[in-house]
Each structure stands twice: as C-alpha cells, then as structure tokens.
Image (cartoon, rainbow, N blue to C red):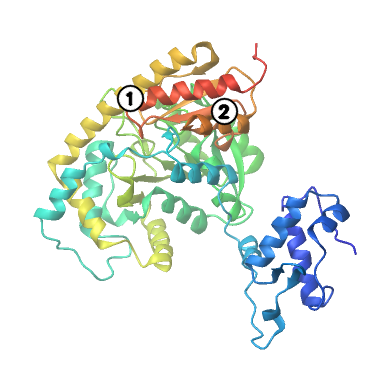
Amino acid sequence: MDWNLDRKAKKPIYKQIAEFIENGIADGTFPPDKPLPSERYLAKELNINRSTVVSAYDELESNGLVQRIRGSGTMISQDIWGITKKRIPSWNRYIEAGSFLPNLPLNQRIRKEMEEKKLINLASGELSEDLFPTSALREITSTRSFIGRLGYDHPQGNAVLRMTIAKHVKELRNIETNSSSILITSGAQQALHLVVRCLLKPGDAVLIEDPSYHYNLPIFQTAGIKTYYLPVNDEGIDTDELLALHKKHRIRMIFLNPVFQNPTGTLLRESQQKAILEISSEHGIPVVEDDPYSLMAFSGERVSTLKSMDTHGNVLYISSLSKVVASGLRIGWIIGPRSVIERLSDAKQQIDFGHASFTQWIANDFLESAHFHSHIQKLVKELEKRCKQIISSLNYFLKDQVEFTIPQGGIHIWCKLKRDVDEMKLLENAIKQGVIYVPGTTMGSEKGYVRFTFAREKEKAIEEGIRRFADALNAAKGAVIK
C-alpha cells in the first residue's frame, strides 16, 4: 500500500496519515469489517514514531471515523455505514481549506501561554488594568443617560462620535478633517483588514516596515498581496530605499507606523515624513499610517503625524482608543477621502451592520470630558516610569548582553541580543522561568532580537521579568557574537 507521505510538507505527518485512512474508508480500501493496521505495525511500516500513528488515530476517533475496541484494535466506526448513515464532517479539512489564514504558530503559542499560565507579561501590547480610566468610565455609565440609538446606527459610525473625533484629532494631532471623512471601526485591526480587502487585489505589491507589527499579520498573505520590506533602524527608514523598492516592484500602497514604531520605538524625523509624502505625491502611492502611540510622547510635546502634514489626501490615517484608553472598548477609526470611507463603510456594513451604539456613546462622552486629558497625562507619566524601570533592569541584569535604543514614547523596547541563541529554546526557557515576551523574528526578517512591552506590568514585575529573562538567556547555549 503506497501511503505517499511527504516528509518535507508543512502538513504534519499524522495529518497526512489520517487523511489517507479517511479517503481509504470512503473508497473501500479499508473495509469496515477489519481492523486498521495496529499502531506498532504502522509505525514500523512507515518508519515513524508510534506516537505519530497514535495522533493520527486520535484525530480519526475525534471525528467519529474510528473507534478503539480493547482486544480488537482500531475499527472503522459502525455509525458511518450503519442504519443512521450519519458522519461527522472532517472539520480539520475545512479548517485547512479555509482562505482566511491563521496566526503564525509562534504567535498562537504566545497567546495561549499568556491566557493559561500566570506569567510576567512583557509580550502583550495592551495597558494593564490599573492604567484604564475605570472610575471615569464608571461615572459616565452610572450618572449620564444613554441617549444613543439601540437600532442600527449610521454606516460610518455614530455622527456625534465622528464629530468628536474630528475635534479630537484637530486639537491633539493637528489633523484637519470632518465627520464625513471618518469611519468608526472595531479597533485599528479591523481598519487594516478593511483597507487590505477593499483597496487592494491579489498580486498587488505593498511595502511594510521590517521589523514591524504588520510583519506578523497574515492578512496580506490571505488576500494574495505581495509584501516587500522597508528596513527600520535607529534613524527611521531610508526614503531612497523606499523609492528604489517602488521602481523595482511597482508598489501600490505603503504601510507605516511612523510614531514610536512597534517594535523599535523609532520616531520619524519631520524631514523623513516630508520625503515620504513627496514620494507619495509624485508617484501616486497611498500611505496607510497606523498611529496608536502619538499621544504617548514622554516629553509631553505634540508629535507630528504624516496625516497632519498631508495636504493632498494621500494618507489613510488609522488610530484607536485601544492603546490610550482601554482595548476592550474596541473603538478605532479611519480618516481618508470621502469616496474611500464610503467604500470601506459599505464593506463594514456587510460584516457587522455597523459598530455597537453603547460603546460609541461611552467613547464619545469620555473624549468630551475633562477626564480624558487628565487620564492621558497620568498615563504618559506612568509609562515613562515603567520605561525607565525596564531600561534600568536591562542594564543591571543583562549589561553587555543586549543593545537597545531608549524609546521616547510608546510602550515597546526593541533589544538586539549579542549572543547567538536558539530562539525557540530561549522562549521555552523564559516560559519555564515564568516570563513571556515576543521573539524578534515574528516581527522582522532578522534573527537575534526580542521585543519587551512595558505597559502591562508594574515596575516590580518588570524588574523581576527581566531578571527571569536574563536567567533564561544564560541557560541558552550559544557563542558570543564579536
């Protein structure tokens, strides 16, 4: 019997075995009155570990295709061809055949570890609960009457909230816009999905930063988009490299996070921002600006965004309240040309019939209140304290083992390891030590980096987390890079 296993394929061997047997059950290769090959025999026949065969049979059993009978072996389930003639769908096949790609396995692992284990969390890109304006939000919900609509709202989002956001970005981000050029989204993540799905087509080429948060998003691959990488360093990006990549690949769109970039913390200089806008205008390339952090400058000064300098309408501006208020509100927005906003709004309507009225009401009242400004001031001071703590801890526990640039805002610090270590072994060591972080390759093409986030833990936990990471690094074998 030719099992035709592909040992170089991405699909695990146990899944290939399970699918072969499932097809054999359907076409009669494996008759219902005889047991399937024993686990020991099949492992020897295919020259694989017995545990691999066990996993294959476990999968078939979970799908209702086989049953294990003590003394008789693994038999084809009688319910498949019996009186009921019912079968459980092969859900794994449907899962694998879906066009919407899953997160990278490493990202799934990190998320699972954060959810299931009590770890010092230097990985999650959200605020700790003590940084949420909980008391102010409770006051809004308990003392003010809800005057919004409980039916479907405007396709672009609540009109009052959109006017408030227009006023907000004018006052704090120097962006001129109006309510008709704003679409309310379920955070920045949905905004990115809408842009990719509605404004690009399979085969289009886009530029993303390397490293960047966008690097680990499967949305580009899901949509059949070709991604090319624009290197980011301490000085930001090289606009000559941007132009060269466009000339070579005919770039259709540029995705940037120019203010306290995730993960490097880089802040693009005004001259670089102007150069990007000039290239955009000269070649007609739209720029998607993802701006979660521009209110988080430790200096307290206003930071220029690309959109604030955009005089031709070339920039689609994405932001949200997730990083500055609370991730659970799920309030984000896109600012752009009215025709684009209407197109994205139509797509959002098809997905969820518009955003929830209640959270829009809460977001509007909080943005309008004096609580918002005092909250931002408190937030920035607290984040600066935590940033100083992580820098102090890195210098104390890791000394000459890492290099990093001190961020001037945001919530991340990007570290280069001076030791060549196995990334997965280092992560496993860290989890055993009780700390989690983001390995650099999930956010960029180069090895030897890690991203620590200092917004989720308080100072003492940050110090302990870096100490545990240092222990994990010292336990990982590798040659020191000279």
Looking at the rendered image, the disc whose residue lies closer to the viewer, 1 or 2, is 1
- SS label for mark 1: helix
The residue drawn where x is 39% and y is 36% is 306
x then y, percent, for residue 404: 48, 19
> Label 2 sits on what residue type?
Asp
Residue 240: which disc? Answer: 2
In this rendering, position of residue 427 left or right of residue 11: left
In this rendering, position of residue 382 left or right of residue 192: left
**Which residue is under mark 1?**
459
Label 2 crowd (10 A; few <14 / some 14-19 / many >=20): few
- Give the quarter of the image for residue 357: bottom left
> Label 1 sits on what residue type?
Glu
- Marks 1 and 2 close (CB-CB < 8 Å): no
- Residue 13 in sight from this viewpoint: no
Task: Give the farthest residue toward the right.
Answer: 1
- Give the quarter of the image for residue 418: top right
Q: Nearer the viewer, residue 314 or 72?
A: 72
The quarter of the image holding the C terminus is top right
Q: Nearer the viewer, residue 278 or 419?
A: 419
Q: Is residue 390 above or below residue 47?
A: above
In this rendering, position of residue 453 left or right of residue 108: left
Residue 218: which disc? Answer: none
